[in-house]
Image: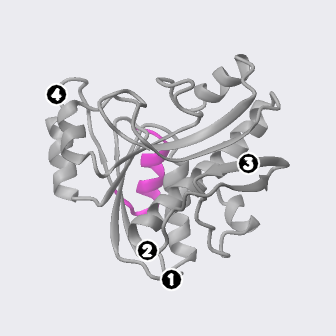
Amino acid sequence: KDCYLATKILFLASGHGGNLKFLYLLSKVYPALDISISVIGDRECGALAFAKARGIDNELLSIDLCDQSNLMESINQLNPDLIFTTIHKILTDSIIDTFSSRLVNLHYSLLPNHSGLIGLKCLESAIANRDFLLGVTTHRVNSILDGGTPFVQSCFQNTFDLRTAVKISFRVGCKQVWSIVSGLVGSETLTATVSEEMIFGSKVHHIPEIVVLPSEVDDAFWSEL
């Protein structure tokens, strides 16, 4: 369905910015997705470099663990509809309380498993722990670290191949981001059903069912990421 509203999306980032790149490139090949994107980074990182290279609104901000009034001010000025946070800082209660309905975190594990870890360390920990299932969770952000209510969880069998697990998890994470953005700005809604698909030879289950990506997201699109 192509019913979208202009939406302002903010990424709080410390890393490579893979999901930022995905959503930005998607907005370029799928014009029905009418969004504006901003990036705040707490360090020079891949996400900020990408934003600068593509002319995306960006800011490098020193973020204190206790006093995040400067971050509060920047977010208020941007007034985003949705905030994806993969920043390597714990947000203060004042930030969470103010923006709780808009904060979303993506975590490369089946939470609550391996909570508190950052980025690919979740996958490394799950493989080292010999978990039967690996997964990806997008969830609301609350005052409990990685303890917010999940929007979507996806899982796939652990084959103990980190490289493949990273590829699957990134692809799944992008699809979860798209599902959340679609639910926010369009007429699609997540259902209570379970879906499954094959990604890089592994069967992946999504709970609830995710929103299908536009046909413009083909092999050539993924190769840009």
Report how far apart the C-alphas of labels 2 and 4 lie in the structure: 36 Å
201 w.r.t. 1: above or below: above
Chosen colour scheme: one colour
Q: Position of residue 151 (x, y in %)?
A: 47, 49
Q: Earlier in the sequence, mark 4 or mark 3?
A: 4
Q: Residues within 10 Å of mark 2 (few under 14, many from 20)?
A: some
User: Which amino acid, mark 4?
Assistant: Asp
Q: Which element carries disc 1, helix, strand or loop?
A: loop
User: Which amino acid, mark 2?
Assistant: Gly
Judging by the rendered image, the residue that carries numbered circle 4 is 67
Of circles 2 and 4, which is in front? Answer: 2
Residue drawn at x 21%, y 59% as measured from the top left: 79
Quarter assignment of residue 209: bottom right
Judging by the rendered image, the residue that carries numbered circle 3 is 204
Judging by the rendered image, the residue that carries numbered circle 2 is 186
User: Which amino acid, mark 1?
Assistant: Asp
Quick one: 187 or 7, which is closer to the camera?
187
User: Which amino acid, mark 3?
Assistant: Val
Q: Which element carries disc 2, helix, strand or loop?
A: loop
